[in-house]
Image (cartoon, grey):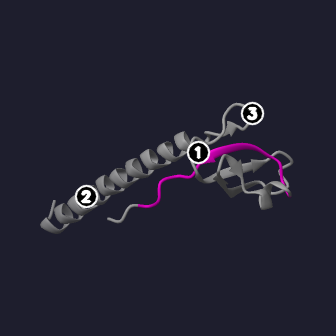
Amino acid sequence: MSLQDKTRAAANNYQSLNRKRYADMDFIAGAEWERQRDKWIRVEDELPPKNGYYFCFDDKQYFGAVIVGYFAKMWNPQVTERMTITHWQPLPEPPKEK
């Protein structure tokens, strides 16, 4: 095997390992997103513990999932007069700078 062939083989091996590393990182990130994604809480079971903004789901799926404010132990009335919130979940953490 020539030096050029050995160099090419080493470069291909490096690229393959690099792709696998990124594929593993993507898989882990996707699994973590999926783990956090399906945490809908029924409003009949529990309301948010503190003031803030939350993903909320409309029972008729007319609006789907929207972000709604929850303050003073109540949902934003401008939203609830147009939709019935049946489920909610916390917003994900914001992106972190690298």
What residue do we see at 75% from left, 33% from top?
A: 44
Residue 44, numbered label: 3
Mark 2 vs mark 3, CA separation in Å = 54 Å
| Mark 2: amino acid | Tyr
Q: Dot 3, how many residues are within 10 Å of its Cα: few (below 14), some (14-19), or many (20+)?
A: few
Q: Secondary structure at mark 2?
A: helix
Q: Dot 2, how many residues are within 10 Å of its Cα: few (below 14), some (14-19), or many (20+)?
A: few
Image side of residue 32 versus residue 47, left or right: left
Coordinates of residue 12 in the picture (x, y in percent): 28, 60
Residue contact between numbered discs 1 and 3, judged by CB atoms under 8 Å = no
Q: Where is 45 relative to 10, above or below?
A: above
Q: Dot 1, how many residues are within 10 Å of its Cα: few (below 14), some (14-19), or many (20+)?
A: few
What residue do we see at 16% from left, 59% from top?
A: 1
Mark 1 vs mark 3, CA separation in Å = 20 Å
Toward which corner of the image does residue 43 lie, by quadrant? Answer: top right
| Mark 3: amino acid | Glu
**Outermost residue to the left:** 3
Q: Secondary structure at mark 3?
A: loop
Q: Is residue 86 magenta?
A: yes
Q: Which residue is mark 2?
A: 14
The C terminus - image quarter: bottom left
**Outermost residue to the front:** 72
Residue contact between numbered discs 2 and 3, judged by CB atoms under 8 Å = no
What residue do we see at 49% from left, 43% from top?
A: 31
Magenta-drawn segment: 82-95
How many numbered dots are placed on residues in this image? Answer: 3
Residue 37, numbered label: 1
Coordinates of residue 24 in the picture (x, y in percent): 39, 47
Q: Earlier in the sequence, mark 1 or mark 3?
A: 1
Q: Earlier in the sequence, mark 2 or mark 3?
A: 2
What residue do we see at 32% from left, 55% from top?
A: 16
